[in-house]
Image (cartoon, rainbow, N blue to C red):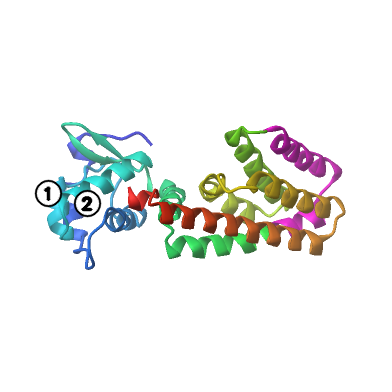
Amino acid sequence: MAVTSQPAQSAQPTDLAQLLRPVVRESSVSEVAKRLLDHLSAGNIRPGTRLPAERQLAEALGVARSSVRGALSALDVLGIIEIRPGSGSYVREGTSEFLPRAINWGLMLGQRRTQDLVEVRTYMESVSARLAAERAGDEDVARLEEHLGHMRDAGHDVKAFIEADIAFHLETARIARNSVLSDILHSIRALLQVWMERAGDIEGTASGTLCEHGAVLDAIRARDPEAADRAMAEHMRMANERLRASLEAESEAGTGPAGR
């Protein structure tokens, strides 16, 4: 959605400052960003709204201006706000677009809420695979084989590998022929991409992922719902382990977003 800067279409900058409460524990960029993101995703602020100045936000939250500045920069990178030099910070998109980005931000910080979402996604993917095995036709199986082939042919092209991986999952949801399930999985596609990007540097990720997807495909091709459920659940378990290993490695190295 385009950002409008006309004062008549934007809330006054002080509105958000009045909604905020001080950050109780020791301030950090991640805590400030999460507080702002909570209000943005809840729909308390309209698209195009100019946010309060750094000083006002810092006073409302009870934190240093440097923490506010870092949080705003992070939200700008994620495309949630737009920082206009000399003008201020503006809400870039509607609330319908905030959920995938909120998941993205939470995953980078390793928050508990994201782990809950990952857990829910695990069950959803398993149901998707089960239904796909029950309802797949020959053309559906052929499309899954094509996506797996693209993953195999990607080689060291991480971006191409991830795109084919996501396509495999979304194709599985489409084959399940459940519009609600498909819509939910599409809505968290940002999580799928970030998940795989985070674990991409773990040794054996590509080969393990290919093997796991192959098992899912074999079960769907055999029209075996139980096997498809088990294969997808195992893939989700291993993917979660790779994600956890990636986050732990970053935490030990101090290279994660929260440690920069």
Q: Which residue is mark 2?
A: 67
- Where residue 171 sits in the image (x, y, percent)? 69, 45
Q: Which residues are magenta?
A: 127-154
Given the image, on which type of amino acid does mark 1 rest? Arg
Quarter of image, res 37: bottom left
- Where residue 12 sits in the image (x, y, percent)? 16, 46
Please tell me which residue lies in front, 49 or 85.
Answer: 85
* Cα gap from disc 2 to disc 1, whole angstroms: 11 Å
Relative placement, left or right, of 174 versus 48 is right
- Where residue 54 sits in the image (x, y, percent)? 16, 46
SS at badge 2: helix
Given the image, on which type of amino acid does mark 2 rest? Ser
Sequence order check, earlier mark of 2 and 1 = 1
Res. 244 in view: yes
- Marker disc for residue 36: none
Quarter of image, res 60: bottom left
- Where residue 65 sits in the image (x, y, percent)? 16, 50
Relative placement, left or right, of 86 versus 118 is left
Res. 127 in view: no
Query: For mark 1, does the 10 Å Cα neighbourhood hold few (<14), some (14 to 19), or many (20 or more) residues?
Result: some
Residue at 74% x, 62% y: name it: 229
> Is 10 contained in the magenta span?
no
